[in-house]
Image (cartoon, rainbow, N blue to C red):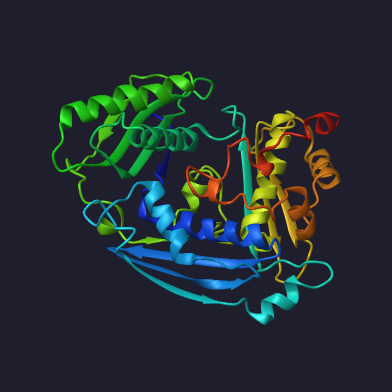
Amino acid sequence: MKKLFTSESVSEGHPDKICDQISDAILDECLKQDSNSKVACETFVTENYLLIGGEITTKAVVDYAGIAKWVLKRVGYKDAATGIDPEKCEIVIKINTQSPDIAMGVEKKEMGAGDQGIMFGYANSETQTYMPYSIQIAHDLVHIASKLRKNGAFKWAQPDMKSQVTIDYTNEKNPRIDTILMSIQHDENYNQELFEKFIKSNIMDVIAKRYGLNTDFKVLINPTGRFVIGGPKGDTGLTGRKIIVDTYGGYSRHGGGAFSGKDPSKVDRSAAYMCRYAAKNIVAAKLADKVEIQVSYAIGKPDPISILIETFGTNKVSMDILYKALNENFDFKVSSIIKTLNLQSPVYFRTSKYGHFGKKEFSWEKLDKIRVLEEYL
């Protein structure tokens, strides 16, 4: 019997990802002007209608509608027929300030968590990015497809895309791609045979070879046979609805909190980044092949209530030594996380598509603890 695992990703043109990008673009604009901005921004989009709401306390002067239009145009939407018209869609702004009840816990001398909750971070040794094959490949598929669409090489393609990758772990020492599924929005009048041939040769095979994996996998492209109506015209979008796409594709557990549109005082985001930072460095230092870290917080309290390390039996040192290494090298106090990872900088728009993890430019992806962690071996 085969041992199969599947993850999915979506392109920047997917309605939920449009919302994530707008929320994070607004967050970045707030932080550019005021690094102490407190932001919880939600976006909703449907056919030719866009709503931006939430709680924002900032000194920044923000053109919310202008940012939304910029994102829509950048993604590639041009008119209502393809999904949404950036210039003619209705845009409604409903922004309030942060609750004073939350502010009193966050803005005291020693910053407390902006909310209670549980967060997870994960890393394994499957890929050079220390991400699982299925989610990393799924991201890369829609990323390269979007790039090819934007530069004109991917004929007939429109912005809304999804990918799904199934990895065969029957022989765990030699994983293989079992199936790749891609659903890609296309023009009304297109050549289906050439369209699908391009996807297999110029997208699927290219990414499979990038990871040294097989190209004889099963292929599914637009399984219904048609994907013309897409984007917000075909599906309502909402910030924070792609939390599994944003993290580890289901390969690791998830605390339930979304990321986009939240400033780093919201530990749903910042603590999840810190957990990934710690897990990735532990795996890179070869203390374990797989690491999942869970933390929990109480609103207004600076330190986590709990920290748990799970190695799935792959640890090369005792669990006592692993906890010692974690506690001595990673500070999960809220203010320390923000300082360590430089999270008051406007870096969040880049996170809002193709995953929050596995990209070298992010501070939580740096491998600067390997040498000191190797001393625990």
Which quadrant does the N terminus fall into?
Answer: top left
Residue 240 seen in this snapshot: no
Would residue 346 be found to the left or right of residue 68 on screen? right
Seen from the viewer's position, the closer of residues 334 and 219 is: 334
Above or below residue 180? Residue 241 is: below
Above or below residue 112? Residue 164 is: above
Residue at 81% of width from left, 33% of height from top?
373
Give residue 11's position: percent from left, percent from top. 39, 44
Would residue 198 be found to the left or right of residue 347 on screen? left
Give residue 102's position: percent from left, percent from top. 68, 76
Above or below residue 99? Residue 42 is: above
Above or below residue 345? Residue 287 is: above
Q: Quadrant of residue 223?
A: top left
Q: How many labels, in total? A: 0
Seen from the viewer's position, the closer of residues 361 and 325 is: 361
Residue 63 seen in this snapshot: yes
Would residue 289 be found to the left or right of residue 242 on screen? right
Would residue 193 be found to the left or right of residue 125 on screen? left
Residue at 23% of width from left, 36% of height from top?
156
Residue at 32% of width from left, 36% of height from top?
181
Residue at 49% of width from left, 53% of height from top?
243
Which quadrant does the C terminus fall into?
Answer: top right
